[in-house]
Image: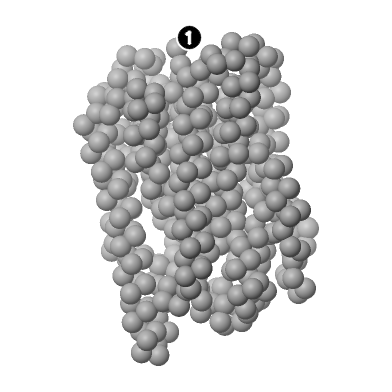
């Protein structure tokens, strides 16, 4: 049977951590806010951020490639593919049991406040996952990965409107370049062998539009997670990160299960498993591996959101986009056309532009800090002001 080309890129997670909590081992009060400034952050903090970035890159790349492998090997259930993106959330309960309890005095928002947040965010995540699952049937993995870079542009807008993110010329350049990178793929779709020969008329365009829509919703989700931790949770311990991640993804998984049952696709699962190219065991291993990879990526993403910002977490995810097409060419035989290569280079340039802005901010903060000043990263300035008011 022909293998639809599918992939699901990120969604969903959440993660603040104990080091960011004023009640954690790092201390309290204004000193906690001071440590969040680039010029005063310690080596351990940066190592943890780098570790989170590595988990995001590896988790997203592995999950995307496993999702493609599922379709290539005979899988065809969109709701099952949707479920794998959030179905691994019960595994977080094990980590939650192993983490230390919240310190005395840690903010404990009322359940009446958090339950609507869990339901709202979880439902958004569930339908965003579904949008990716359906859209990506009509896009090759390399094209999908690069079109999904527009989530950074959308996240820039939501970060500005919801999180009071401040922008500079370099950040604006990053957003514009990444947006044009995705647009270039849409204009040059005729050069992609998948669009013309393998798909019904209009399906490539539909996949492109749905991927853009899913990217916009995902950007909104990241900004809502950030504002949730700042305004509602008001705590940044690892337990709260795992708790929010687990609850929202449980709701998203419930949406997927309801869809699987209502659509009748559950009846096709036994036959799909039996017909899977590499056997039943490989079928189960593929789904489990995909679910675990998405959860690892999601948790690390939310750790970055609570340590830095939603925009920084999204930029980190964008770094994996050039990696996915390379692996797709090697593993799945995707065509790396000239237009796709140029778009990939533009995506890399956009990311480096953003990273360079953080480099400049760090140097400026360190220099002014040495003179007794209190310089702040211009990207995180508004956020730091809000964090200083949090209980520490």
Mark 1 — residue?
A: 1
Residue 286 vertical placement versus 76 (above, below): below
Looking at the picture, the colour scheme in use is one colour
View extreme (bottom): residue: 372
Query: Residue drawn 49% across and 48% down?
Result: 56
- Residue 35, position in %: x, y? 51, 76
Per the image, label 1 sits on a secondary structure element best described as loop
Whether residue 310 appears in this view of the structure is no
Q: Nearer the viewer, residue 305 or 162?
A: 305
How many numbered marks appear?
1
- Residue 119's place in the image compared with 165, above or below, is above
Residue 290's image quarter?
top right
Judge by depth and name the residue closer to the eye, 219 or 241. 241
> Looking at the figure, which quarter contains the C terminus?
bottom right
Task: State the image coordinates of residue 131 (x, y, percent, origin top left).
Answer: 52, 33
Q: Is residue 186 above or below residue 310?
A: above
Give left or right: position of 379 versus 179: right
At 60% across and 75% down in the image, what residue appears?
A: 26
């Amino acid at each position: 049977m022909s293998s639809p080309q599918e992939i699901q890129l990120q969604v969903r997670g959440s993660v603040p951590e104990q080091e960011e909590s004023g009640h954690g081992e790092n201390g309290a009060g204004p000193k906690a806010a001071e440590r969040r400034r680039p010029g005063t952050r310690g080596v351990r903090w940066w190592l943890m951020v780098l570790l989170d970035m590595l988990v995001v890159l590896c988790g997203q790349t592995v999950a995307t490639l496993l999702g493609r492998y599922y379709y290539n090997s005979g899988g065809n259930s969109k709701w099952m593919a949707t479920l794998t993106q959030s179905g691994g959330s019960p595994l977080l309960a094990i980590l939650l049991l192993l983490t230390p309890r919240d310190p005395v005095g840690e903010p404990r928002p009322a359940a009446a406040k958090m339950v609507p947040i869990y339901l709202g965010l979880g439902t958004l995540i569930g339908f965003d996952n579904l949008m990716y699952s359906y859209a990506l049937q009509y896009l090759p993995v390399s094209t999908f990965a690069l079109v999904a870079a527009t989530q950074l542009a959308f996240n820039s807008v939501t970060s500005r409107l919801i999180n009071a993110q401040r922008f500079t010329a370099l950040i604006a350049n990053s957003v514009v370049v990444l947006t044009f990178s995705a647009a270039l793929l849409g204009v040059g779709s005729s050069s992609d062998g998948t669009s013309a020969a393998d798909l019904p008329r209009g399906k490539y365009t539909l996949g492109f539009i749905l991927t853009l829509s899913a990217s916009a919703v995902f950007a909104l989700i990241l900004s809502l997670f950030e504002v949730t931790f700042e305004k509602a949770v008001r705590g940044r311990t690892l337990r709260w990160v795992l708790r929010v991640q687990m609850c929202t993804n449980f709701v998203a998984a419930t949406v997927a299960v309801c869809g699987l049952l209502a659509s009748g696709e559950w009846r096709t699962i036994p036959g799909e498993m039996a017909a899977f190219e590499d056997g039943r065991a490989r079928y189960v291993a593929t789904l489990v591996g995909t679910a675990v990879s998405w959860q690892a990526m999601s948790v690390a993403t939310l750790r970055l959101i609570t340590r830095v910002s939603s925009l920084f977490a999204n930029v980190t995810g964008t770094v994996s986009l050039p990696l996915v097409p390379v692996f797709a060419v090697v593993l799945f035989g995707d065509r790396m056309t000239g237009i796709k290569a140029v778009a990939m280079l533009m995506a890399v340039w956009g990311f480096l532009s953003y990273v360079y802005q953080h480099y400049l901010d760090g140097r400026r903060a360190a220099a002014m800090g040495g003179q007794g000043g209190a310089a702040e990263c211009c990207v995180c300035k508004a956020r730091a002001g809000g964090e200083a008011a949090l209980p520490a």
